[in-house]
Amino acid sequence: MKKHYVSGLILSGGRSSRMGHQDKGLVLLNGKAMIEHVYNTLIAQVDDVIISANQNLELYQYLNHRILSDEYDDFRGPLAGIYEGLKVIDKNSFLLVVPCDGPLFPADLCKRMLETVAATDSKLVTVYDGTYRQPTYSLIHQSLKDNLQQFLDKGERKLGQWLSENKTQLIDFSDQPEAFVNINTEADLAKLQQNTD
């Protein structure tokens, strides 16, 4: 299988309105910031890591990786963070996107996505958990940067819509849908804490 350079991007720039506007990446899960759980799983799979954050930037410095903030100041959601990531990675490389509030994603996520790229020659791969598409878990080729910029410049901001317009290749993770649980509320956090203690 052809070797592709892959940069990991952790999306931690959201407003977290359902969790009282806390910075979800810094919320503690089993005594560690949630982003640390994500980082530890991601760093073993990719060539380097980038963090997308729009607040508390100094608190993310301890991870010793590049931190990017959105160019757009009107909060365009995860697509804005993805665009910043695509701007800084090398041509002909991929960006593996994961959210800071999904600490259970698989240790072979990147490997399986790259296998799908090799089999389909796709530039865009997204997780399907057997019931839903999981757009914040996507592998995106750098060549889609200009396409995404045009989408954002039109005022569009829905990640799912952009993926659909660009014929994303779905990768089936129906064997482990629980790996893509997102922590959106205090109740979600308490439940996960209880299950992983």
Image: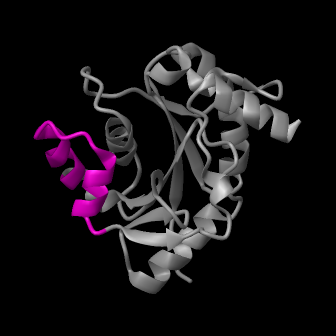
Instruction: Please indicate whether residue 170 sits to the left or right of residue 152 in the image.
Output: right
Q: Is 149 drawn above or below residue 14 in the view shown?
A: below
In the foreground, 76 or 16? 16
Is any atom of residue 3 visible in this view?
no
Quarter of the figure with the N terminus:
bottom right
Q: Is 17 drawn above or below residue 160 in the view shown?
A: above
Instruction: Please indicate whether residue 40 sits to the left or right of residue 166 in the image.
Output: right
For image coordinates 52% across by 80% down, the residue present is 2
Farthest residue in the right direction?
197
Q: Start and end of the magenta stretch?
A: 147-167
In the foreground, 123 or 176? 176
For image coordinates 27% across by 58% down, the residue present is 144
Color encoding of the figure? one colour
Is any atom of residue 55 visible in this view?
yes
Q: Where residue 106 sits in the image (x, y, percent)?
A: 68, 58
Q: Where residue 9 sits in the image (x, y, percent)?
A: 51, 44
For image coordinates 67% across by 54% down, the residue present is 179
Q: Is residue 71 magenta?
A: no
Q: Where residue 170 sits in the image (x, y, percent)?
A: 44, 70
Q: Main secondary structure of the magenta part?
A: helix
Instruction: Please indicate whether residue 185 sits to the left or right of residue 52 in the image.
Output: right
In the foreground, 64 or 26? 26
Count of all numbered marks drawn on residues in the image: 0
Farthest residue in the left direction?
154
Q: Is 156 drawn above or below residue 54 in the view shown?
A: below
Q: Where residue 105 sits in the image (x, y, percent)?
A: 66, 52
Quarter of the figure with the C terminus:
top right
